[in-house]
């Protein structure tokens, strides 16, 4: 569960607790605080993909990523006394910023444990949103041990980035929007490509669609070399990545799928899709030129799959999330220099 001051352990009863009611409750708490992002399209992208592509740009969300949904859901979902003591989170940046802004707007303290090699813009933004940043070395330090120590010493509540029912429920609100927007466009059957790290976004959207748009099927998309979810879906057990860093898609690099997210994704999602780093950069350049959107590499993998892996996808319509836009200028410039011409 959401054990106070410890990394949650998960048992087989957890998925039963994760249901559509939690997502609807999160949507009610997010009302007036979250941006309802549009569903965009471009004839140029349709032509490249050989089908209609509908883009859900969560890069336009507060803090530049869908993570604000989960952050707000988690902070607003805590009991008032627990919340007042403050929250702690670990993140390479997007979850950090989502939790930091949600905490700031609730007037409570946020401590964020971040890898020291996270993109500088993410570290700066997290501090600018009022959080205290505690850096750690990805290779040497035990992130969970640091979090647990701070939780105990300072009586903070840990908000993990994906294996947390309140966070999954918040990310699921994006799925409720997709269901409504797809219905408005007359889309009843389509794959929904979701950028996937630990699976919080993927599982939340999948749970929402199961109830609200059963003809829409989620498919997780990951970068090459960090395709733990795709491999886990194939084998039926949680598979771990051999490397923990070294990808431009830093936003969606996790050691393995979550204990809470994996059963949901394996029950509801189609096969995973895997893209190269260059495909992600190319998708960033196309999102910029065709949709006027700024995407970060990890946020562009689903669009990359839509455009460059069309043969692995079926159907006339395809819905794609751009999950985040928090990209360093140098990386964005590299994408445009390489593929913008």
Image (cartoon, rainbow, N blue to C red):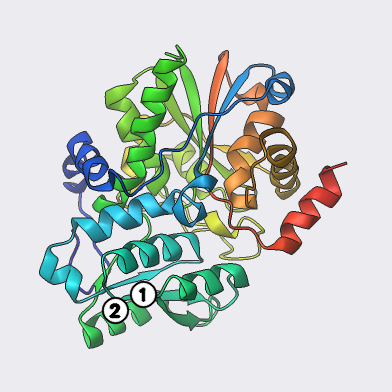
Q: Nearer the viewer, residue 234 or 263?
A: 263
Which x, y percent locates residue 329?
72, 62
Rendering quarter of residue 82:
bottom left
Mark 1 Cα within 10 Å, few/some/many (few <14, many 20+)? few
Q: Secondary structure at mark 2?
A: helix
For the N terminus, the image quarter is bottom left
Q: Is residue 175 above or below residue 149?
A: above
Question: Circle 1 is placed at which residue position?
Answer: 144
Q: Is residue 134 above or below residue 120?
A: below
Question: Circle 2 is placed at which residue position?
Answer: 148
Q: Is residue 4 visible?
A: no
- Residue at 37% across / 82% down in the picture? 146
Which x, y percent locates residue 208?
31, 32
Q: Residue furthest bottom?
A: 153
Q: Secondary structure at mark 1?
A: helix
Q: Nearer the viewer, residue 303 or 268?
A: 303
Which x, y percent locates residue 168?
31, 47
- Residue at 46% across / 14% down in the picture? 187
Rendering quarter of residue 153:
bottom left
Q: Is residue 308 above or below residue 154?
A: above
Q: Is residue 277 left or right of residue 168?
A: right
- Residue at 45% across / 53% down in the picture? 62
- C-beta proximity under 8 Å, tags 2 and 1: yes
Q: Residue furthest right?
A: 341
Q: Is residue 185 left or right of residue 69?
A: right
Q: Is residue 119 above or below residue 227?
A: below
Which x, y percent locates residue 10?
23, 56
- Residue at 54% across / 50% down in the picture? 324
Mark 2 Cα within 10 Å, few/some/many (few <14, many 20+)? many
Q: Is residue 319 left or right of residue 152?
A: right
**Real-space Cα distance between discs 2 and 1?**
6 Å
Rendering quarter of residue 328:
bottom right
């Amino acid at each position: 569960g959401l054990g106070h001051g410890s990394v949650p352990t998960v048992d087989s009863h957890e998925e039963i607790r994760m249901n559509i009611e939690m997502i609807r409750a999160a949507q009610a708490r997010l009302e007036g605080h979250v941006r309802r992002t549009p569903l965009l399209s471009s004839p140029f992208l349709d032509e490249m993909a050989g089908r209609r592509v509908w883009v859900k740009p969560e890069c336009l969300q507060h803090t530049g990523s869908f993570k604000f949904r989960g952050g707000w859901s988690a902070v607003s979902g805590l009991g008032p006394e627990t919340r007042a003591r403050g929250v702690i989170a670990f993140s390479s940046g997007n979850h950090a910023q989502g939790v930091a802004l949600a905490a700031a707007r609730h007037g409570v303290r946020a401590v964020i444990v971040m890898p020291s090699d996270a993109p500088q813009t993410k570290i700066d933004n997290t501090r600018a949103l009022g959080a205290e940043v505690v850096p750690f070395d990805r290779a040497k330090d035990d992130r969970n041990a640091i979090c647990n120590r701070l939780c105990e010493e300072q009586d903070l509540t840990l908000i993990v980035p994906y294996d947390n029912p309140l966070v999954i429920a918040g990310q699921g609100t994006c799925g409720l929007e997709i269901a409504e927007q797809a219905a408005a466009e007359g889309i009843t059957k389509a794959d929904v490509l979701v950028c996937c790290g630990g699976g919080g976004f993927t599982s939340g959207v999948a749970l929402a669609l199961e109830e609200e748009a059963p003809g829409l099927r989620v498919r997780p998309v990951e970068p090459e070399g960090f395709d733990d979810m795709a491999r886990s879906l194939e084998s039926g057990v949680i598979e771990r990545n051999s490397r923990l860093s070294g990808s431009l898609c830093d936003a969606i690099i996790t050691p393995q799928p979550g204990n809470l997210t994996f059963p949901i994704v394996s029950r509801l999602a189609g096969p995973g899709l895997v893209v190269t780093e260059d495909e992600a950069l190319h998708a960033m350049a196309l999102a910029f030129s065709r949709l006027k959107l700024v995407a970060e590499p990890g946020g562009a993998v689903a669009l990359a799959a839509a455009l460059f892996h069309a043969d692995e996808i079926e159907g006339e319509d395809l819905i794609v999330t751009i999950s985040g836009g928090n990209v360093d200028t140098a990386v964005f410039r590299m994408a445009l220099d390489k593929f913008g011409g």
